[in-house]
Amino acid sequence: MSEFWLISAPGDKENLQALERMNNVTSKSNLSHNTKFAIPDFKVGTLDSLVGLSDELGKLDTFAESLIKRTAQSVVEVMEDSKGKVHENLLANGVDLTSFVTHFEWDMAKYPAKQPLVSVVDTLAKQLAQIETDLKSRTAAYSVLKANLENLEKKSTGNLFTRTLSDIVSKDDFVLDSEYLITLLVIVPKSSYVQWQRTYESLSDMVVPRSTKLIAEDKEAGLFTVTLFRKVTEDFKVKAKENKFIVREFYYDEKEIKREREEMNRLLSDKKQQYQTSCVALKKGSATYRDHKVKVTPLGNPARPAAGQTDRDREGEGEGPLLRWLKVNFSEAFIAWIHIKALRVFVESVLRYGLPVNFQAVLLQPQKKSATKRLREVLNSVFRHLDEVAAASILDASVEIPGLQLSNQDYFPYVYFHIDLSLLD
């Protein structure tokens, strides 16, 4: 299980014996795997300052956990093509999260224990606040890039009635720069191909004979060209519509088509090179992008490349700046979070067990989800002497204390904090 319980008990002889009993019971019953959790001796200060720190650390704990989840979710989004490898990238100081927690050592260089507790907490708070600020700005930039790319990609989805035609047509399909002639694009249902070929020349006067050509088709229809005199354009559109042939409004602008293709290529390149390990690739031989539901096949010249297609393989490897930043700062935030847990254990132990500082922290890893209730009962029984009244109410649900409502979730006779790594799954 990726769940841990971080507890502490006074360090006197009686309670060390209680910890030993707990280890024996939980080991024999295979309830949990237990290890000592080393916490430095901090400068305590006043009890009033500890009470204030207790509240502040509670809020910081919640904030750190939220930040870790958001950072992990950003890794998932950036690694959209490699989701199976996400957990390989969610590490703390180069090791998996479970190993880091079970082998935790206080980072004296980053968070000197000789400093006042208030300063240590302030350092952690500022570090996490900076990570959050950077996370917001970096993910916002990524979202803008992704949205722009998706907007362009949407133009290449759908059927012939709605999708962009710039990646289907070519200059050779049109009569351009003519004062009298114009080439129209007509969408013809597949069931009406024969009818189109038989009737298009007579739909209006001044249609150029044998000028139609099928240049692309999807599952439902085909895209045909037809050339006619400009002055009969409107008449031809009306007659075509009467026969269920739809003239698609399109003006061939080579500069605009080139700009659109270059923009798509640029965004694809940015998404790959600047942000993630791999990017959405263009399918060779197809005029659609990967994951598009409607495939439109260019016809005519088989050598003509699909729009945006290059000889360079777009499925490159490598790790972009955003993914690198997310990995590094996920690690930093997670490490800070576990340090906050250690500080909470220290502060709550001093407040509960008093001075001089003397307690033992223990990390428990429940072996089975079904055994957590039994494990909690064992702990409450072993340490009930630490708070006989509260412990009795926990062990005996029938006992009611006026003005006090307790449950297993609300109170423990020992210091207890929860670390749930499954929240990152």
Image: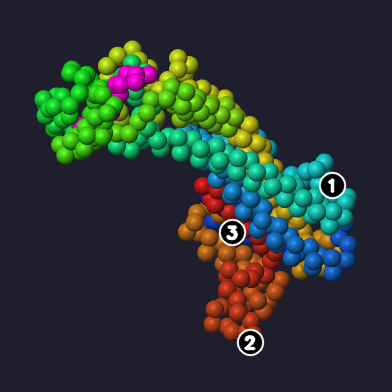
Residue furthest out toward the bottom: 402
Q: Is residue 121 left or right of residue 284?
A: right
How far from the left and from the top, in percent, is residue 207? 20, 23
Quickly name the residue at label 1.
112
Splitting the image into 4 quarters, where does residue 343 fall? Answer: bottom right
Q: How many other residues sit within 10 Å of disc 2, few (<14), some (14-19) or many (≥20)?
A: few
Which residue is more in the foreground, 223 or 364? 223
Which residue is depicted at the point 21% across and 32% down? 236
How far from the left and from the top, in percent, is residue 101? 65, 46
Q: Is residue 250 left or right of residue 382?
A: left
Q: CA distance from mark 2 to mark 3?
A: 33 Å
**Is residue 186 on the magenta stretch?**
yes
Disc count in the image?
3
Q: How many other residues sit within 10 Å of disc 3, few (<14), some (14-19) or many (≥20)?
A: some
Q: Is residue 365 above or below residue 227?
A: below
What span is colored magenta in the figure? Answer: 174-188
Q: How many other residues sit within 10 Å of disc 1, few (<14), some (14-19) or many (≥20)?
A: some
Which residue is more in the foreground, 220 or 339? 220
Quickly name the residue at label 2.
402
Question: How does the figure colour the protein chain or chains?
Answer: rainbow
Mark closest to the chain's N terminus, 3 or 1: 3
Q: Nearer the viewer, mark 2 or mark 1?
A: 1
Q: Give residue 368's mark.
A: none
Quickly name the residue at label 3.
25
- Amino acid identity at mark 1: Pro
Q: Nearer the viewer, mark 2 or mark 3?
A: 2
Splitting the image into 4 quarters, where does residue 184 fall? Answer: top left
Which residue is more in the foreground, 50 or 208? 208
How far from the left and from the top, in percent, is residue 75? 56, 40
Which residue is depicted at the point 16% across and 39% down? 242
